[in-house]
Image: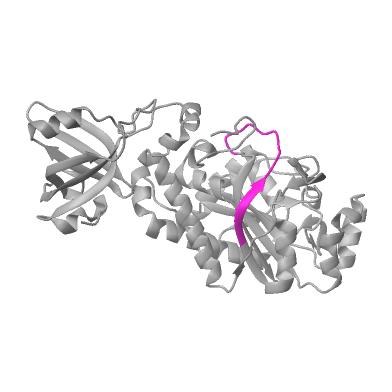
Amino acid sequence: MHRILSSQLTHHVGATVRIAGWVHRRRLLKSVAFLIVRDAAGLAQVVVTDPAARAALEQLTEETVVEVTATVAANAAAPAGVELTHPAVRPLGPPAVPPPFDLYRPALTATLPTQLDNAPTALRHPTRSAALRISAAAVAGFRATLDARDFVEIHTPKVVASSTESGANVFALDWFGRPAYLAQSPQFYKQLMVGVFERVYEVGPVFRAEPHDTVRHLAQYTSLDVELGFVADHRDVMRVLRDTLAGMLGAVTERAGGALATLGIEAPQVPAEIPAVHFTEALKIAGAPADEPDLAPAHERALGEWARREHGSEFLFVTGYPMAKRPFYTHPDPARPAYSHGFDLLFRGLELVTGGQRLHRYDDYLAALAARGEPVEPYAGYLDAFRHGMPPHGGFAIGLERFVARLTGAANVREVTAFPRDLHRLTP
């Protein structure tokens, strides 16, 4: 007899079936006992009336792995409208040591540090696993949307020879006696691969040795990177980003509807055209001084409120960031060289995506590095490709964990990360 999942029980009313999973909860009443079994698809209720079976059930602990062979009976009060009767319950291992919190309760009440210290079991709670299902669906939607637009998935090195993107904020390591670093992003490589495939994307880890201890930062996170060639300017990139977000949220609704329901949320609609404001206008809207070089979190929140109020949108593009606050490879605005063809996308008042048009001429790179007083030599392997012809191009990167945290309303990005790595945490 093949094992079936709890979600399939409704198709087998009257039949004898075999399920397996974890003891989610036991309810031992005077004349009857209920065993709730949890598997990857949900919960199944098992009714135990036989005295011997009840005595065996009393010896089991929550989270013990069991197999149940029983008859499926309709019961509107049971999960999914069915329950299992006349069961034979067989443990598939020794009684489990109960975790330091009750996984059967609707909310996981343990503190976040306790949850993270016990992540392998805390993640079994439906609210924690729901966030990870949403994350998986979002990545599936990301890939599907870009595959349909002739993008090619690439895989770039995560160990690099020089710390060129942002100075000291890198993790150094020993590479067979030579210094090396964990990659902060696939930025340089995905640009180079535009010269091969024109349109590329990557899903992979990135590493930032930034001493942030906030609810929105991780030292390792998953970056969804995109780069595309033959763009007119940054607006072509923004259009691809808009469609990608719509595809991701569509996949979340389709593939992780149960997870959304568990968390009591709905995926927002992405407008056909996401509203956009220039950086200088954004400062005015946020009530910030005109000489501010960047947007603070309070400014982003004010802009998010404005976008909802004025446009009914959870999303807002801020374009034209000052060149002084953008990487050297960012293309300046020809009409206003102090400002860039770079943008951020705010989602519910939080910066979610950074992107823009890149430089694509070798001489422009030399000039940009010289203007910043940086040597060319550390970038030689990267810059060489631009000597051999590169099209106008641009791209963006989405932080997956930040996206899911904002979507689910999590107060801390660690709540939607399976095994977070930050300033203080390297285990489990």
Q: Nearer the viewer, residue 305 or 372?
A: 372
- x, y (%) of residue 417? 51, 42
- x, y (%) of residue 410? 48, 39
Residue in the image at 50% along x and 47% along y? 404
Above-or-below relation of 106 to 307: above
Quadrant including the N terminus: bottom left
- x, y (%) of residue 192? 75, 66
Residue 232: tell me if it is visible.
no
Left or right: 259 in relation to 231: left
Q: Nearer the viewer, residue 349 or 195?
A: 195
What range is drawn magenta here? Answer: 202-216
Q: Nearer the viewer, residue 63 or 245?
A: 63
Above-or-below relation of 279 to 110: below
Q: Is residue 226 magenta?
A: no
The prevailing secondary structure element of the residues shown in magenta is loop
Left or right: 102 in relation to 11: right
